[in-house]
Image: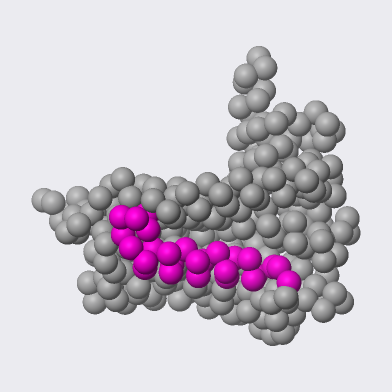
């Protein structure tokens, strides 16, 4: 019974970013760190790694050891980024008990899930593990791996940390496009194969757009909280109505770029399987044409996030279909 209860707790946290209802001190250690690390969103990075892996299969020079190690590396980098963002935003005063970060899920420090010292320790441990992976990959693949990794680390830190704090100046969204697109996909591909070309660069962009759409949705949800704090995310700069339109445009752009990638041979034709996610986009489209509801739907787990949740549902389905389409492309190529 205890094991089943723990499994339910872990699954709930992985689905919702929240622990099951109940007192904080009753949360088991694994659930606690699933929530603290926001492990529920790590599949975004896993999909980017799988896109790179499926594009790399069959290419001359492919070594599965380094490809797998690179995927572990980008996943750890995402985890470290989540931890660092909470640490920096708390330090500069952006995160508070009334800020959305502490409302849609328990804040690691403010909710008492972990101490600041424990969070700093976790950041150091994860980054050291990533550094060890970088040393191995650099030894076998050379300096370009270091360039990909350092660029990703700098952009991840600069996203929330002083002095740059890119998200405060409308640059957080382009940051995410670069990191979850070219840096993650091309860097992972290069680690596995030892070279990278323009087709992989093009193929890295569609999923990057979906990741930016999720962030745009989240920052649109937070406009009324960010603007008074002087945090000028892109939705704050654009205004809510235009931000919602841009988010829809990013999701449409995903399908257009997949189509272009197929036309020029950067992706196999079965990648068009992503079109099966269009009904999900059609379903959420009307919600982006109006303001969010005044109250959350019954059982809605991440309120006050609204547009972020809608974009995440679409990204999860479209990303999974992209991976499946690329896998089917390998099967079709082998026939």
Is residue 149 visible from the viewing direction of this image?
Answer: yes
User: Which of the pair 286/9 is nearer the observer?
Assistant: 9
- For image coordinates 19% across by 50% down, the residue present is 331
Q: Position of residue 61 (x, y in %)?
A: 20, 57
In the picture as drawn, the residue positioned furthest to the top comes out as 1
Q: How would you classify the magenta stretch by its main secondary structure? A: helix
In the picture as drawn, the residue positioned furthest to the left comes out as 335
- Residues in magenta, as a range: 137-162
Image quadrant containing the N terminus: top right
- 91 to the left or right of 155: right
Q: Position of residue 21 (x, y in %)?
A: 78, 35
Q: Position of residue 265 (x, y in %)?
A: 22, 72
Quarter assignment of residue 245: bottom right
Quarter assignment of residue 196: bottom left
User: Which of the pair 299/334 is nearer the observer?
Assistant: 334
User: Which of the pair 273/257 is nearer the observer?
Assistant: 257
Q: Position of residue 45 (x, y in %)?
A: 49, 55
Is 122 situated above or below 248? above
Q: How many circles with numbers are drawn on the protein?
A: 0
- For image coordinates 82% across by 66% down, the residue present is 92
User: Which of the pair 29/221 is nearer the observer?
Assistant: 29
- For image coordinates 44% across by 50% down, the residue present is 133
Magenta span contains residue 288: no
Is 276 situated above or below 112? below
- 307 to the left or right of 193: right
- For image coordinates 35% across by 73% down, the residue present is 201
Is 289 situated above or below 271? below
């Amino acid at each position: 019974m205890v094991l089943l209860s723990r499994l339910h707790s872990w699954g709930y946290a992985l689905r919702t970013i929240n622990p099951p209802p109940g007192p904080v001190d009753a949360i088991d250690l694994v659930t606690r760190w699933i929530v603290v690390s926001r492990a529920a969103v790590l599949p975004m990075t896993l999909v980017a790694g799988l896109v790179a892996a499926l594009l790399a299969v069959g290419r001359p020079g492919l070594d599965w050891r380094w490809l797998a190690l690179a995927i572990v590396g980008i996943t750890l980098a995402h985890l470290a980024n989540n931890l660092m963002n909470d640490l920096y935003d708390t330090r500069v005063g952006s995160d508070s008990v009334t800020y959305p970060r502490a409302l849609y899920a328990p804040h690691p420090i403010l909710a008492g899930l972990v101490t600041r010292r424990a969070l700093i320790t976790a950041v150091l441990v994860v980054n050291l593990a990533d550094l060890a992976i970088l040393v191995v990959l650099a030894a076998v693949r050379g300096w370009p791996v270091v360039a990909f990794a350092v660029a990703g680390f700098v952009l991840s830190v600069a996203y929330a940390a002083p002095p740059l704090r890119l998200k405060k100046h409308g640059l957080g969204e382009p940051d995410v496009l670069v990191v979850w697109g070219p840096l993650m996909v091309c860097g992972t591909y290069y680690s596995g194969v030892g070279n990278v070309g323009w087709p992989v660069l093009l193929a890295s962009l569609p999923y990057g757009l979906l990741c930016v759409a999720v962030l745009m949705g989240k920052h649109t949800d937070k406009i009324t909280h960010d603007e008074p704090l002087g945090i000028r995310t892109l939705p704050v700069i654009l205004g809510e109505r235009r931000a919602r339109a841009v988010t829809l445009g990013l999701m449409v752009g995903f399908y257009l770029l997949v189509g272009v990638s197929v036309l020029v041979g950067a992706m196999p034709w079965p990648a068009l399987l992503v079109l099966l996610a269009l009904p999900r986009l059609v379903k959420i489209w009307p919600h982006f044409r109006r303001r969010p509801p005044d109250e959350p739907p019954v059982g809605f787990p991440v309120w006050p996030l609204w547009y972020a949740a809608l974009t995440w549902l679409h990204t999860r389905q479209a990303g999974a279909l992209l991976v499946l389409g690329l896998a089917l492309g390998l099967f079709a190529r082998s026939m």
